[in-house]
Each structure stands twice: as C-alpha cells, then as structure tokens.
Image (cartoon, grey):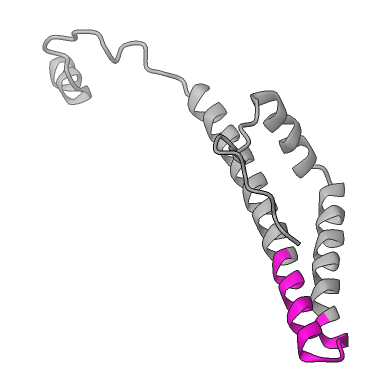
Amino acid sequence: MDIPEQPKDFQPELILTQQQVADLAGIMFHPGFKVFQLIGKSAVDQFTTSCLNQDDDKQILSAHKSAKVAAQLYTMWLVRMKQEVHDYSSAIKDKDKIEDPTANLDMGVFATLDDVEETLS
C-alpha cells in the first residue's frame, strides 16, 4: 500500500479553542471517563494478545506492529488530553489570582512591614 505524499502545507497539529478544552475537561472529570479509559485499555490489550495467536513469524511481526501503534495512539491521545486540560486549568488559576493593589504604590519610608512596625513602636 503506497501512502500518498503529504501536501507541503499539511499541519497535523490541532489547536483547540478554550470552549473545546473546557468541554474536554468536563468529559475527563466525568465518572464515565474512567469507564471509557478501561475500554480503551482493553482494546490495546486485544491488539497485544493477538500477537500470541499468530501462526508464523510474519504474522507475529505484523500483529506486534499493530499492537505498538494501538498503544502509541492511546498513549498520545491521553497525554494530549491531560496536557490540554492542565494548561487550561493553570491559565484559569493564573488569571484569577488576586493582585495586591498597593504593590505599585510609592510607600516612601513604609517600604516594608518592618518599617511600619518600627514607626508604630
């Protein structure tokens, strides 16, 4: 089977919108996602087990390649999902940090808390 040549401007990288990542986070934190993962792992295991059920070396090698691709795909898929959700939740946490409104004020002699305490005593 010949693989057609990829166009020169082919970009396999997918950039998700914030809404898509938020939806993805909702799916990943849903209790049903653990069931979905079990099914995915089971499918990868079926590919791996098929290596044992082959008759000759050529079939074993072919089954091994399929099992390897299945495991790599499943792993890449989970890593990407976790990374997207982690980046999204980190961005939200950074954005929601409370900033000190007095941080940029010129406090003169009261530059530190120690200075204030010394003045009051």
Quarter of the picture containing the N terminus is bottom right
Would residue 103 appear left or right of 77 to someone viewing this image? left
Q: Is residue 10 above or below residue 104?
A: below
Q: Position of residue 78 (x, y in %)?
A: 69, 52
Q: Nearer the viewer, residue 11 or 6?
A: 6
Residue 64 in view, yes or no: yes
Magenta-drawn segment: 51-69
Residue at the (87%, 55%) spot, across then down: 35
Q: Is residue 29 visible?
A: no
Check the picture and name the quadrant holding the C terminus: top left
Residue 100 % position (x, y): 37, 17
In the image, 44: left or right of 65?
Answer: right
Q: Main secondary structure of the magenta part?
A: helix
Is residue 63 highlighted in magenta?
yes
Of residues 121 and 41, the one drawn nearer to the viewer in this rendering: 41
At a point 31% along the width and 11% down the height, the residue shown is: 102
Name the residue at 59% across, 38% down.
10
Q: As rendered, which of 108 and 44 lies closer to the eye?
A: 44
Q: Residue at x 19, y 8 (%)?
A: 106
From the viewer's perspective, tell me whether residue 89 is left or right of residue 39.
left
Q: Quadrant of residue 24?
A: top right
Q: Position of residue 49 (x, y in %)?
A: 84, 80
